[in-house]
Image (cartoon, rainbow, N blue to C red):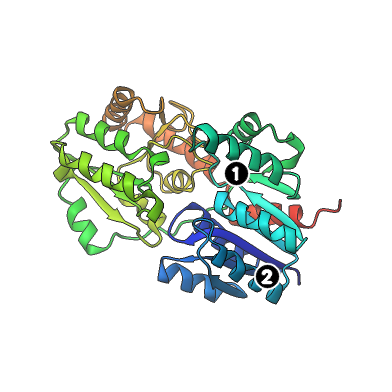
């Protein structure tokens, strides 16, 4: 069987690591999968070790010569037929590996967004254009992500394919410590968002504070990477200034968080950019109404008034209005129709479909 090496920054609960693991499980017997990333979450790393042919602990969260040398040794040892990079970190290492090991490279953006300004921004765009000359295909997980990527980078359209994430859930009861908290409130709003600037947690908590609903709580499941420590500090400081701080719970990384969404009343996303948000699909499968920002990725899933409630990015007042509308419609005929529409589209994002499309891309004849 062919060998595929998956690269991403870290074994940490979140979009890329979870979706890659789902592909690895779904493609067993079709390819031999390997993975390399930085071990942050021991349980997730152990899952990779168990499900893949072999998984390696290499810090790919930023460029380090030591990490590159270690990765190069791994590549020479396993001799993969395909290297599949995920995100900017995986992309950079795959690009450098190509200089020494000229095998097929595929590149999934995993939420392409503009993080830098000035010279850093120009360098980022130049890298994307240069990298496109070396990878076989890039994968956007939504049509809006592809459109945004092409517009910003100027990469040729034929270099990018759209393949949605494969998602599945197994609805579970909350752990006792979380259930005890949830039981205190009539309305529980949840967001599966790491503490990252692109998730715009400040807008999330500010809007919840302005909601001024004593019967409601906001639950945020998601940790943070080392590079986001300054934003985490900003969020912690801002939380202290809010009158509703006692109703906001930061639960950190929760294993299998998507399986718990059904225990909440509303799902909330304030992201500034997404690829194809797995958590919104999980909310749809859980029959939980979604209130989401109009960023790329979100707009592929949420149509205002039809499959959810949409508001303008960073619009605090607009978000408060949508939350109030969603709360007022809980259990109503209008909202039941929204949930039905959302569930119908979410059922198309199966893991089998995702695996099949990616396998065809890997082995498509030139």
Q: Position of residue 135 (x, y in %)?
A: 73, 50
Q: Secondary structure at mark 2?
A: helix
Q: Is residue 20 above or below residue 45?
A: above
**Picture residue at 48% right of the left edge, 38% below the top:** 115
**Residue found at the far right of this picture:** 366
Q: Is residue 187 above or below residue 175?
A: above
Q: Position of residue 247 (x, y in %)?
A: 17, 44
The residue pinned by badge 1 equals 141
Q: Is residue 135 above or below residue 53?
A: above
**Picture residue at 70% right of the left edge, 35% below the top:** 155
**Picture residue at 65% right of the left edge, 73% below the top:** 73
Q: Secondary structure at mark 1?
A: loop
Q: Position of residue 150 (x, y in %)?
A: 66, 33
Q: Pick the residue in front: 159 or 352.
A: 159
The tag earlier along the polypeptide, 1 or 2, is 2
Q: Is residue 25 visible?
A: no
Q: Is residue 362 visible?
A: yes
Q: Position of residue 227 (x, y in %)?
A: 40, 51
Badge 1: how crowded within 10 Å, few (<14), some, or many (20+)?
many
Q: Which mark is residue 75?
A: 2
**Picture residue at 42% right of the left edge, 65% below the top:** 40
Quarter location, residue 188: top left
Quarter of the picture containing the N terminus is: bottom right
């Amino acid at each position: 069987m062919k060998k595929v090496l998956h690269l991403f920054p870290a074994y940490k609960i979140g979009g890329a690591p979870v979706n890659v693991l789902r592909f690895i499980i779904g493609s067993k017997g079709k390819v031999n999968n390997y993975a390399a990333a930085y071990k942050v979450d021991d349980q997730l790393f152990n899952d990779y070790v168990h499900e893949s042919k072999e998984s390696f602990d290499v810090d790919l969260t930023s460029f380090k010569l030591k990490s590159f040398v270690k990765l190069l040794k791994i590549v020479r040892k396993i001799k993969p037929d395909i290297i599949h990079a995920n995100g900017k970190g995986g992309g950079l290492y795959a690009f450098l590996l190509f200089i020494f090991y000229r095998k097929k490279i595929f590149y999934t953006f995993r939420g392409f967004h503009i993080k830098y300004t000035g010279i850093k921004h120009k360098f980022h765009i130049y890298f994307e254009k240069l990298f496109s000359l070396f990878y076989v295909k890039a994968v956007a997980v939504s049509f809006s992500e592809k459109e945004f990527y092409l517009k910003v980078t100027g990469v040729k359209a034929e270099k990018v394919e759209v393949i949605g994430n494969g998602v599945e859930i197994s609805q579970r009861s909350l752990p006792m410590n979380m259930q005890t908290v949830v039981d205190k409130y009539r309305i529980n709003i949840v967001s599966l968002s790491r503490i990252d600037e692109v998730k715009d947690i400040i807008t999330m908590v500010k809007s919840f504070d302005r909601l001024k609903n004593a019967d409601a709580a906001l639950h945020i499941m998601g940790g943070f990477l080392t590079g986001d420590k300054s934003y985490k500090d900003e969020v912690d400081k801002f939380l202290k200034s809010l009158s509703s701080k006692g109703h906001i719970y930061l639960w950190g990384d929760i294993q299998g968080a998507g399986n718990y969404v059904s225990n909440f009343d509303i799902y909330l996303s304030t992201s500034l950019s997404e690829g194809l948000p797995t958590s919104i699909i999980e909310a749809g499968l859980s029959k939980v109404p979604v209130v989401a920002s109009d960023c790329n990725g979100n707009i592929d899933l949420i149509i205002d008034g039809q499959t959810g409630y949409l508001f303008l990015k960073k619009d605090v007042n607009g978000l408060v209005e949508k939350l109030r509308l969603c709360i007022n419609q809980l259990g109503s005929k209008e909202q039941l129709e929204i949930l039905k529409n959302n569930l119908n589209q979410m059922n198309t994002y199966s893991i089998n479909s995702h695996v099949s499309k990616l396998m065809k891309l890997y082995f498509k004849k030139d």
